[in-house]
Every structure is written in C-alpha cells, then in structure tokens.
Image (tube, rainbow, N blue to C red):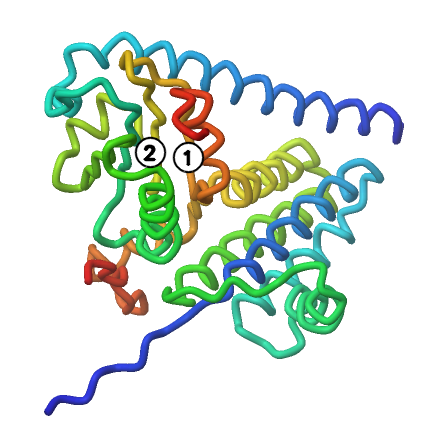
Amino acid sequence: MTAQAPVRRVDHNGLKVGQAATIILLLVAFIISSPLLVALVAVAQLLGALNSPYAPYRLFYQKVLQPAGIVKPNIIPDNPEPHRFAFLVGAVFNGVGAALIWLGVPVVGWALVWIVIALANLNFWLNFCAGCWMYYQFNKLGIPGFTQAPLNSTP
Amino acid sequence: MMWERLIIAVSLLAIGFIAYRLYHQRHIRHVNAIAPGDPLLQTVSAPLPTILYFTTPTCVACKTAQSPAIQSVQTILGHESLRVIQVDALEQPDAASRWGVFTAPTTFIIDAKGHTIAVNRGIADAGTLLKQIHTAANVIS
C-alpha cells in the first residue's frame, strides 16, 4: 500500500478578498496620489507572498470578514505557491512603482500600479491569475524554485 | 488635482468596462458566425439547448465547482432537455482557439437553434446556468 500525499487546499475566497482589497487600495492611492499607500499595498502583498501570519489581507479576512459572516470560505484543492508568486509579482510591481513615483518618474510608476489593478481585476472577475500562469510556465521550463506542477484534476 | 485623478481613475475603469463589453459582444457575434459549421456542434442531432463546456485537466475549479454545477443542472432539467458537450481545451487547442477560449472553465449557452446566448468566463454556478438555459429554451416549467 502506498502512502498518498495529502490533498493541498487553498481558500479561494481569501484570495478574492486580497484581490478586492488590492484594487480598492490602489485606486484610492492613485486618486489621492499617495505612493506611500502603494508601498503599503506592496508590503501587504509581500507578507502574503511569504505566507506570514501577520499578512494584513489574511488578518482582515480571518479576523473581520469571516467572523462577521460577510465572506464564507471556499476551500478547494489547489497549490498555494502560484498564488503566493502572484502576490510577489504584485508586490514587486507596486514596490517599483512606488519607488519610481518617489524618484520623480510618476508616469511609469503609476503605469506599473495600473497594470496591477488590471491584473487584479482580471483575477477577481474572470478567475484568470496571471501570476499563477507565469508560475506554471516557469515550472514547465524547469526553472529552479518553481517546484509545483498543476494539480491533475482528472478523477 | 484629486478630482482630476478621480476622473482619470473612473475614466480608465469605464474604458476597461466598455472594452470588455465590446469584446464580449464581438465574441458572441463571432461564435454565432462559426457555430453552424463547427465540428463540435455537429454531434448535436436533436434541437436541444446546449452547454458547451471548455475545461482542462489542470483546471481545479472545473472539477470542484463547474462540473458539479453542470451535473446539478443536468439532473434538474433531465438529459432529454439539455445537452452538455465537454471539451478539453488542451487536447483540442484548435477548438479552443475557434471559440475564443482563454480561460477554464468557459461555458457557452447555446439555444436549440444553435445561437449562443451567453458566455461565462470563469465559474458559472447552477443558478446562473439555469437562468441562461431558461432564456435559451424555456425548458424550465
């Protein structure tokens, strides 16, 4: 008898909360012209990418939205690593964007922020995770660190 | 200054939304143009509303959410009232390309005359599918 690896699961509604928060906060950052808020979003995404228990989106979801019954978990079999990589990509774009705005290159900086807004919208509304897609392409190419292949969902 | 940025943000979001709606309408027109001669629909013998369901072997949401929703709809309506054609987009990339599929799951709701009346990119729950099929064929009494 062979031991089977436990099924890995991801709460996709937790991810949706992160995407929605990212969209809203980045829009607010753009409207009030605050690279500081962009940088804070980048830090929040970075903590999410590192799977930190203090990641703000996670705390907001687990301590506020879930207990209040506003959002219910939607836990399905999936690899968490591609989603963390997507957070990391967002953190890099926002981090570089914030730095460029501070350094006096606002057009490029805000363009990077708007790319994150667009990709987060794509993920939130159409379930297309560009970061996850990149992760699995890197896995296919055998790039070190991208160890997780897509879960085979066939029965 | 803040008002200007607010207007820019709203404009960009509106442009994105309008671009998506235009793309959606164009996509519907495109699939309606190719549907009559498309090999995927040639298996349809009786004039029934159809769900054309694109999936991939690696699509977790397809297995955990979309397939159960479609099965549930088929159970409610009965196999004689609804046809489901499932297509593996990785096995049939040409079909996915013809139908403009870029994400899995994608479901097309096609009426008995072969007209696509709805496209769902991402998960469509059973309630949504039932409503769309009802629009397509009035099969729910």
Q: Using residue A64 as the reference point, say whether residue A2 is left or right of it.
A: left
**Front residue of this view, candidates A92 and A61:** A61
Q: Using residue B124 as the reference point, say whether residue A16 is left or right of it.
A: right
Which residue is situated farthest in the front direction here? B141
Residue A71: x and y, percent? 66, 60
When asked about the image quadrant of residue B46, the answer is top left
Q: Using residue A145 as the reference point, say whether residue A62 is left or right of it.
A: right
Residue A134: x and y, percent? 35, 50
> Does A58 appear above or below A6?
above
What is the count of numbered marks?
Answer: 2
Q: Using residue A91 as the reference point, say whether residue A130 is left or right of it.
A: left
Residues marked 1 and 2, same chain: yes
| Residue at 25% over, 59% down | A153
Asked if disc 1 and disc 2 are in contact, CB closer than 8 Å, the reply is: yes
Residue at which label 2 appears: B102
Secondary structure beneath dot 2 equals loop
Residue B75: x and y, percent? 33, 46
**Front residue of this view, candidates A48 and A144:** A48
When asked about the image quadrant of residue A109, the answer is top right
Q: Which chain does tag 2 point to?
A: B
Q: Amino acid at mark 1?
A: Arg
Residue B59 got which mark? none
Q: Nearer the viewer, mark 1 or mark 2?
A: 1
> Does B1 appear above or below A39?
above
Secondary structure beneath dot 1 equals strand
Disc 1: CA contacts within 10 A as few (<14), some (14-19) or many (>=20): some
Residue at which label 1 appears: B121
**Front residue of this view, candidates B63 and A56:** B63
| Residue at 67% over, 21% down | B14
| Residue at 52% over, 66% down | A49
